[in-house]
Amino acid sequence: MHLAERMSRLGTESAFDVLVRARALEAQGRHVVHLEIGEPDFTTPEHIIEAAVAALRAGETHYTPTAGIPQLREAIANYTSETRGVQVGPERVVVTPGGKPIMFFVILALAGHGDEVIYPNPGFPIYESVINFSGATAVPLTLREEREFSFDPDELESLVTDRTRLVIINSPHNPTGGMIPTEALERLAKLAVERDFVVLSDEIYSRIVYAGVPDSIIRQPGMLDRTVILDGFSKTYAMTGWRMGYGVMPVWLAEQVTRLAVNVNSCTPGFSQLAAVAALTGPQDAVDAMVAEFRRRRDVMVAGLNAIPGISCLTPNGAFYVFPNVSALGADSRAIATKLLDEGGVALLWGSAFGAAGEGYLRLSYANSLENIEEALMRIRRTVETMV
């Protein structure tokens, strides 16, 4: 039996592979500190859970409209209008089981053989995977440490061709925690209007920010009908297992994304959607407390890494990752990550798992307790001392 050729173009997400290896070590009696998975270690706020339980008891267990129930689409439209400073209606909203379907559906709807999609490198690995799967050409846009992992607008402009259909950006950024300044968004917006392409702006970490307010390209002139905002509930409300994401996009594209959703997942569970309504419209104090705790952990993680010979680390402005430079250790990043897991008992990711431009770096999630972070730092120091 033979698989279809397209399957050879589909990648994976290394965090889950490392999690499996770490669990295997734990099954052998080893203690492992988990810094590999991008998942808040907090519990979903109680009022959100109660909304789901009430919905289940009320019989919200049947099919729902593919694009989402009206209450949630309206709540998302209002939230987006308030936080991004533009006016959008519910007809622009498509709700999906998680955020990944939005990137998958948007890329499939806009790009195919002969087309090009520009994406950040290093970046979330599913971007490149889905671009390749669609048959389009994946064009990496390198993010560099000297720019605090934002893109160079001149370099972006040099990559755009008449075949460019989509540019993907992510701010706050996974894996680096970097944020795109307004000046770079202005340049990108002008380019999108002049060269006629759409921007997929992954803003899933928009509420996990430690200084200022993240800008959104949808605010720029001409971008309301050229922008897809990808957002969701997993990170902000500690709802990763609920699988609740959404896209805000031009109406013409929302119609096509909904067609794809009909063919793939039919709809998103109603009780989960009503919980999401409670998340957006209910108290936000749990979010504020979570971000404050992430900031505390970030500061400990950055200081601890910078104190280890051979490692240097920028202070990220958003998300819950650090992306330390380990090139001075004289080994490739995957080998270092493997050594830290096998010998040090610390599960983390190698930079090249996020693209070739990530080589020489590691990604560590600080979505873990301060006690575990301090233990991990001690283990990393001890392991690294054998390499320098």
Image: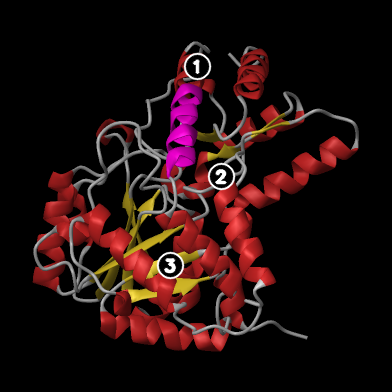
**Mark 3 residue crowding within 10 angstroms, few (<14) / some (14–19) / many (20+):** many
Q: Amino acid at mark 1?
A: Gly
Mark sitting earlier along the chain (1/2): 2
* Distance from Cα at disc 1 to Cα at disc 3: 41 Å
Kindly report which numbered mark, 3 or 2, lies closer to the viewer in this rendering. 3
Question: Please, is residue 328 above or below residue 25 in the view?
Answer: above
Residue located at (37% from left, 26% from top):
315
- Residue closest to the eye, 275 or 264: 275
Q: Amino acid at mark 3?
A: Tyr
Question: Please, is residue 185 above or below residue 167 in the view?
Answer: above
Residue located at (49% from left, 83% from top):
66
- Residue closest to the eye, 14 or 329: 14
Q: Secondary structure at mark 3?
A: strand
Q: Position of residue 173 (x, y in %)?
A: 38, 45
On whether residue 292 falls in the magenta region, the answer is yes
Q: Position of residue 46 (x, y in %)?
A: 60, 47
Location of the N terminus (image quadrant): bottom right
Question: Please, is residue 273 above or below residue 299 in the view?
Answer: below
For mark 3, what is the residue? 246
Q: Which mark is residue 38?
A: 2
Q: Amino acid at mark 2?
A: Gly
Asked whether, in this view, residue 56 is left or right of residue 318, the answer is right
What type of secondary structure mainly makes up the magenta span?
A: helix
Mark sitting earlier along the chain (1/3): 3
For mark 1, what is the residue? 310
Q: Quadrant of residue 387?
A: top right
Any part of residue 324 in sight: no
Q: Which mark is residue 321?
A: none
Kindly report which numbered mark, 1 or 3, lies closer to the viewer in this rendering. 3
Residue located at (46% from left, 15% from top):
303
